[in-house]
Amino acid sequence: MSDCAVLRCTLPVVMGRIEHLIARGHHVTAVVDGWDATGANLDAAPAGQGATYTTGDDGVAATAEQLKARPGIVRICQDAGGTDDTADVFDIETGAGTIDDAPDWIDRARSSFKSGKRPGQREPALYMSSGNVAKNLAALKAAKVAFPVWLWVARWGVTRAFAADEVEHTSGPMPECGFQYHNHPDFDEDVWAPGWLANVSKAPAGKPAPEAPATWEGIMAKLPDLKQGDKGANVRTLQGLLVARHYHIGTTGKLGDGIDGDFGPLTDSAVRDLQDKSGLKVTGTVDSDTWPVLAGV
């Protein structure tokens, strides 16, 4: 993987830590932040835990190359009839699958998960709007589907905190493995249940297991060294993490908080103070020792 590709895959993951640092200090969050996007918009989406489609027309489905490059991405089957029973999620909404298709897809997807037909597949889940959950649950019960059935619910306009609380405290016949709470032109924002994400099917005996997902230590090690005078998206990530730690780095940037992508004297001073308070060598250079401290890893 090229350095540019590594940065595309790791940089937004670190940005996703900013909100956690502000809201919860150094505690590990009980949900995983992520996004979902069509295949046509994958390159515009942030990194982190993503989701995309394996079926669908007009740029909805990701290509085989895109899926191969993102082995841990959540896979969504969108088409009527649920033709991809190795997907993690079946999309139930207008123009996609229907609740009548769901019982058969769930049975087939559970069989695929159990057999390891696609190593890395997660337990089958259904995606639907929060307003349709009650009637869809009734339809599944009428079809005598075996519960529990995982649910990825969509409800735009609520806060991330609301979505996280829903996933953290989920229960009942359709426990929530994900919550889609905000949309952008190119992607939507989600939170995920880490247990559901981590419980993946294994390769049958004699077949190699898929490559393990990157660890935080590995991600941190691949981030670039930064110093005063550097500019760009990497610097904005650094500045966002400093602001999350209550450092004042100026009044520039879109929000007037100093996050402007320009590693200037105030950013340098904040980095040196962080290094000093953390027992690191005070160099002013954000390196593989400093990134984990910034990200709270």
Image (cartoon, grey):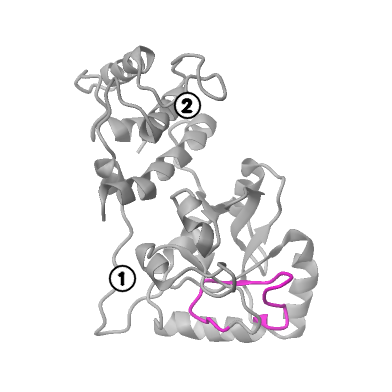
Residue 258 in percent (x, y) is at 48, 19
Residue bounds of the magenta highlight: 83-102
Identify the mark nearer the N-term, 1 or 2: 1
The N terminus is located in which quarter? bottom left
Report helix, strand or loop for mark 2.
Answer: helix
The answer to whether residue 34 shows anywhere in this view is yes
Residue under numbered circle 1: 210
Q: Quadrant of residue 180?
A: bottom right
Of residues 238 and 88, the one drawn nearer to the viewer in this rendering? 238
Under mark 2, the amino acid is Ala
Q: Which mark is residue 244?
A: 2
Q: Main secondary structure of the magenta part?
A: loop
Residue 73 in percent (x, y) is at 45, 62
Q: Is 274 located above or below residue 88 in the figure?
A: above
Q: Quadrant of residue 105?
A: bottom right
Q: Is 25 located above or below residue 14 in the figure?
A: above
